[in-house]
Image: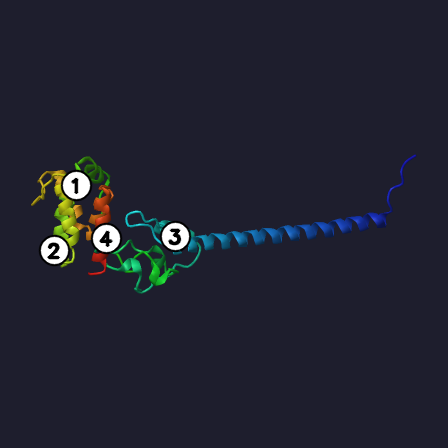
Amino acid sequence: VRAASAPATYRRTLECDAEVEERQLKGYVGELSQRMEELSEEINQKGVQESHMAEPAAEGNEIQPSQSEVVAELAGGPERPPLPYAFSEGGIGHPEVCRRPCVYFNRGFCHSGAACGYCHHQHPDREAKLDKKQRLTLDEITKAQLIALVLHFLRERAEETGMAQEATEVLDIFAEELRFWGGEEIAELESDSKNRKLGKVMARMSFGALLSLASHRLDRDPFQRRLSQALETLRRSV
């Protein structure tokens, strides 16, 4: 015996109900997807703000997103011009002994304001930096040679920028560390090609950049501690 098929009217009713349920389900799924995207965007934005508002790490170990990372993060939105200078904790001692430039301020939205641990002043687009070979050269020389080399350019930079008196304590700390390692100060660099190229770059580096160059390679605790204290005093006196 063949089972009787459902009446046509009943089948149409079932089909209509199924279509309605399908549309409702699609709408619900669409709303969920949209809300998830909004929540993800809010979480990412909050994470960026909180990471920037966190207290900066110690000098020499600071971590901040690169300019390219910030640009990538803001891709798709209109680029805003840099804000005019505003005071920040990291800008004290600019330009010689301030902290690194704040990439957020340069993009126009530093939420930390005056408490920011990075500098809000304008900085050169291309600061003097050692290349790979020059960094390797510094890694290969003795600590005494490194200190003597850095101290030579620190003295020159202090004289050029008119802060020789304020920098006396820092220079004395380097001189004492040089004696600790059995080295002597140098009057001028050797004239070979490698030293000339290295000297040209170091001569263009800021006082703070020279200090950073040395502190990364000189890890004796008493020296690091005294230098950190003297640098903070110097930053607030120039």
Tell me the residue that label 1 is attached to: 146
Q: Which residue is drawn at 77% across and 51% down?
A: 17
Residue 229, label in figure:
4
Q: Quote the CA–CA distance across marks 2 and 1.
A: 20 Å
Of mark 1 and mark 4, the one earlier in the sequence is 1
- How many C-alpha atoms fall within 10 Å of the one at disc 2: few (<14), some, or many (≥20)? few
**x, y percent for residue 183:** 11, 40
Query: As rendered, which of 193 and 224 lies closer to the eye?
Result: 224
Dot 3 lies on which element?
helix
Q: Quote the CA–CA distance across marks 2 and 4.
A: 21 Å
Q: Nearer the viewer, mark 1 or mark 4?
A: 4
**Residue 206 visible in image:** no
Tell me the residue that label 3 is attached to: 70
Q: Check whether the beta carbons of the residues at disc 1 and disc 3 lie within 8 A of each other.
A: no
Q: What residue type is labelled 4?
A: Gln
Q: Nearer the viewer, mark 2 or mark 4?
A: 4
Q: Nearer the viewer, mark 2 or mark 3?
A: 2
Tell me the residue that label 2 is attached to: 159
Q: Quote the CA–CA distance across marks 1 and 3.
A: 35 Å
Q: Check whether the beta carbons of the residues at disc 2 and disc 1 lie within 8 A of each other.
A: no
Q: Quote the CA–CA distance across marks 1 and 4.
A: 21 Å
- Judge left or right: residue 110 versus residue 192: right
Q: Check whether the beta carbons of the residues at disc 3 and disc 4 lie within 8 A of each other.
A: no
